[in-house]
Amino acid sequence: MARRRDLAQRRRARGMSQETFADSVGVDRTTVARWESGTTAPQPWQRSRIADVLDVSLDDLDTLLITLEDGVVDDRGDDERLRHTLQNPSTVDLTATGDLRARLQHLDAQYDHVPTTSLLGAAGQLHGQVSYLRANAGNGVVRHRLLAIEADSATFMGQLVWDVSRRRDHREPVAYLKQAINAAREFGDPVREAYAVLRSSYIALYGEKDPTKGAVLADRAAKTAQAASPALTGLALLHVAEGRAMTGDAPGCESALLEAEALLNSAATDDTAAEHYTVHEWTRLAGSCYLALGQHERAEPILRATVHALSAKRKSQAIAMGNLALALIRQHKLDEAAAAMHRTIDAVEHTMGGGGLVLAFNAGQELREWRHETWAQEIQDRLMGLIATT
């Protein structure tokens, strides 16, 4: 059985039970139990708080979170061992799969804290290594585990490549996501498959600007996840709602939002995707839906609450702030809109997330009516500065 022994040992060394640790981090005790058993891993936006509570650096936390497979102690820094495995791919073993999984988790943990471009090279190299070793593995059990890692790394690459392209390149991200879907199917994991399909719906919704296609893909993701993960099903339904909102289908949007909310309220703590689908995700997407429907006054308070709640998830927060700026501009609340625009640009400058960047420029275009005003010119200058750094 896989266990994160070092995480539990560090918690106990701090004199904390699972209950007190859970209270300090802001999760349920069963969530801590799943982390320590190796069933799930903390989400990136939770890790800063966990590191603070355990009094460790983020890098040290990544080491604590390495999953130990069947008692094998993994050393993420052992590059020589990985080089040997790549030279002799048929010898890849459980130690190597643990190493690769830890490297991927390490990169994923940084996503919300650093510019995406800084991750792309290492993630691409890792994905290539995983695919190569999976294709050449001599051990069936090892190959099966590599399929799961390949599904995750291909999904991560699809996310990174699309982000770096500022959501303009759709072909390459879709190709990575198709690879993730195929690997997840072969591995037999409907949750991984559904998540890759869901990320494909994002490209249709926000990149291709095809809300009908996006809603169809999100619905497919919901159906794929339905039997395995009510939480992921609910997250997919939120994007069904958003696609319907983009086409002006208010009743269809409300229906999907209600169905998603019911799943959120009934989600079990042992759902493998429970940490992906939270009340903050519901409010973020509900605010986006009402914005798309032109219900700006209804969207505004929801988006304000979402911005506050996502303080540890910077790239998602930038998207919520961009949407809030749009809601304020469309109500002609110009002082508040200007403040929201500056906060959006601040967040984008820190992480250079593609979603926040696109929304910042979209909101900037809606300020053209006031382009001769000093405050609007200051915002345009900052937006031009973003162009110079991308």
Image (cartoon, rainbow, N blue to C red):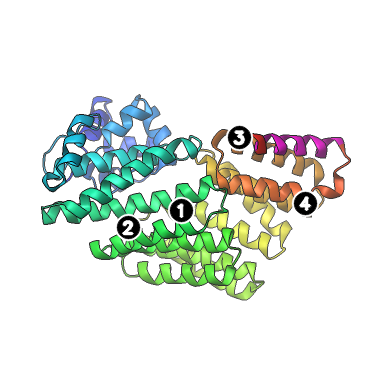
Mark 1 element type: loop
Q: Secondary structure at mark 2?
A: loop
Residue 380: say if magenta: yes
Front one among 239 and 209: 209
Q: Earlier in the sequence, mark 2 or mark 3?
A: 2
Q: Amino acid at mark 1?
A: Thr
Q: CA distance from mark 4 to mark 2?
A: 41 Å
Instruction: First in sequence, mark 4 or 2: give its number.
Output: 2
Secondary element at tag 4: loop
Closest to the camera, between mark 2 and mark 3, is: 3
Q: Is residue 88 above or below residue 10?
A: below
Say whether residue 98 is left or right of residue 114. left
Q: Which residues are magenta?
A: 374-386
What amino acid is found at the position of numbered circle 4 in the picture?
Glu
Mark on residue 271?
A: 2
Asked where in the image residue 241 lies, by quadrant, the reply is bottom right
Dots 2, 1 in contact, CB < 8 A: no
- Residue receiving disc 4: 366
Q: Mark 3 or mark 4: which comes first in sequence?
A: 3
